[in-house]
Every structure is written in C-alpha cells, then in structure tokens.
Image (tube, rainbow, N blue to C red):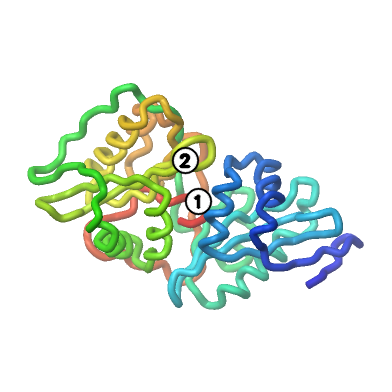
Amino acid sequence: MTQPLAGVPVRFRPLTAGDLPAAHELSVAVKWPHRREDWEFALNLGSGVGAEDDDGLLGTALHWKFGADHASLGMVIVAPEQQGRGIGRDLMTRTMDALGTRTTFLNATRAGQPLYEKFGFKAVGSIHQHQGTGGAHPPAVQLAPGERIRPLGARDPDRLSALLNRAAGYDRTQVLAALLNVAEGVVLDRDGEPVGFALLRRFGRGQVIGPLVAPHIEGAQALISHLVGSNEGKFVRIDVTGDSGLSDWLDDLGLQQVDAVVTMVRGDAPQPEGVARVFAITNQALG
C-alpha cells in the first residue's frame, strides 16, 4: 500500500526476515539496545508492518496475538529524520486494524503516550528499567519454611506456563515456550510445587531477567539474587512493574533505575488469578 507523505510516496507492507538488518539499524538510530537477534526473536513470535520509500525502511511496528482476545504491540520506530510526518500514526492504524477488538497492551515513552491515547489506550501503570552489573555478593533473602530456589527442571514448563497465565490473566503459553528455548531459569519451589520462577537470557547489552513471577516480594528478591549472583560481573537488565516494590532494593543491589515507561491498555485489562503476580516483564514490547 502506498500513501503520499509530504510529496514522497511511502509504502506500507508486512515486515519479513529480510527487513531485519534495516530494522536493527532503525533501533540503533533511536539508541535502543536491541541486537539483530532480539529483533529476530520478536518478529518470529509475531507480525509487523513496515513503512518504506525508495531509499529503504523508514519505520516499523510489531504486534503479538495471545489467543483470540489479547495482544501486545511494540517496536514502534520511525527514523529520526522522518519523524513528525505521520508515519507513526499510519503504522499504528494498520497495526490496530490487524488486532481488531482484542484487548491490547503496550509500554510507551512519555513522548509516545499522546499518540497512543488517540487510539484509545489508557495509562494503567508503569515499568521501571533497572540495569547494571550488580553487587559481587547479592544479599541472601529469607524465604518461608518449605520454600527454596532450584534450577528449572524437565517437568516444569507446563506448570510454569499455567502459573504465568494465571498471574498475567491471559494466555502467555506461546511466549514462554519460545523463551524456554533460549533462556536459563530458576524456580521458587514450595514443598515440591513451583510457586514462582524467573528466566534469564541474552538481550541487548548483556543479560535480561524476565519474566519473573512470584507469590511475594521476598520470593522475587530471592530469584533475582540467585540469577545476579550466578552472573557476577555481567551486565544485567530487569524491567519491573512500578508497583512491584523492588526499585529501591534493586538500586541498592547495583541495578540502577535508568528509565521508566507508561503501561497502557486498550480494552478491559485482564484479571489475574491466584496469589502469584508478575514482578518483571519479558521485555517492554512483549509485556
């Protein structure tokens, strides 16, 4: 599809694997840390639309469908020299047309928030981005009797998927399955049953922790301490919910807060089930 903008024909079309090098260059241009491999992972899990002219790719927007009723969108980028021409708006229009009536989530910068509000998104929370190399010896966290941290086992994926789906309030099975192919994980176990977990994988400048699900803040801290301690000296990032209660503790741990974004939703926000909650998201695009 072609649409004239400021006299220059701009075409909109589905993104393909062949666009990954140019898409990565766009994210570098706006100073995002994503590697080409991070782009590939995101596109393989979902779909995207690109804006281009005769000189190449000008903008991107990706989305991911979770069952029939939920979705997220992200990686909305317009080349810096092309901003202000309505390309972002047109990318969003095509993305929302593809998602239909699904309840849709995104994490927005303050600068991007007004655009998303025009599409019916409302702010419902925030995400705090923390990163650093952490302390040499993360503090031990006292867990309740019967609770312990253990490695992820062969029997865990289905149980962790059910745990994540209840904590999120919607189906995250496909995302977790893809993550388990590229991540290591630890489980918060209570009397032989998993009640929380955290994954760690390569992303951006180093490693990223997420998602992290736990029934209480002490469990979340124990999972983080274990992963940071086992990756001493390595760059680690974690994106926690603004109401997690973890930000001051993470600052003290050496993972400083460097940014915050606004969590937004269009439609009715899902209702989590059970006591476990999502303390840290997978990333700001996938939620």
| Vertical comparison of 34 with 231: above or below | below
Question: Is residue 122 in view?
Answer: no
Given contact means CB atoms under 8 Å apart, are the residues at marks 1 and 2 in contact? yes
Residue at x 37%, y 68% (from the top left corner): 170
Q: Quadrant of residue 48?
A: bottom right
**If the image is split into quadrants, where does the N terminus sit?**
bottom right
Q: Position of residue 255 (x, y in %)?
A: 41, 31
Question: Is residue 67 in view?
Answer: yes
- How many residues crowd mark 1 within 10 Å: few (<14), some (14–19), many (20+)? many
Q: Position of residue 237 (x, y in %)?
A: 45, 38
Q: Position of residue 115 (x, y in %)?
A: 65, 59
Residue at x 64%, y 59% (from the top left corner): 17
Marks 1 and 2, the one that precedes in the sequence: 2
Q: Quadrant of residue 158?
A: bottom left
Q: Position of residue 53 (x, y in %)?
A: 83, 59
User: Would you say 94 lies left or right of 179 here?
Assistant: right
| Three-letter amino acid code at the position of disc 2 | Gln
- How many residues crowd mark 2 within 10 Å: few (<14), some (14–19), many (20+)? many
Q: Secondary structure at mark 2?
A: strand
Residue at x 27%, y 60% (from the top left corner): 163
Q: Could you say which disc has been placed on residue 129 in the image?
A: 2
| Three-letter amino acid code at the position of disc 1 | Gln
| Vertical comparison of 184 with 230: above or below | below
Camera-side residue of 83 and 185: 185
Residue carrying label 1 = 284
| Vertical comparison of 132 with 21: above or below | above
Q: Could you say which disc has been placed on residue 164 in the image?
A: none
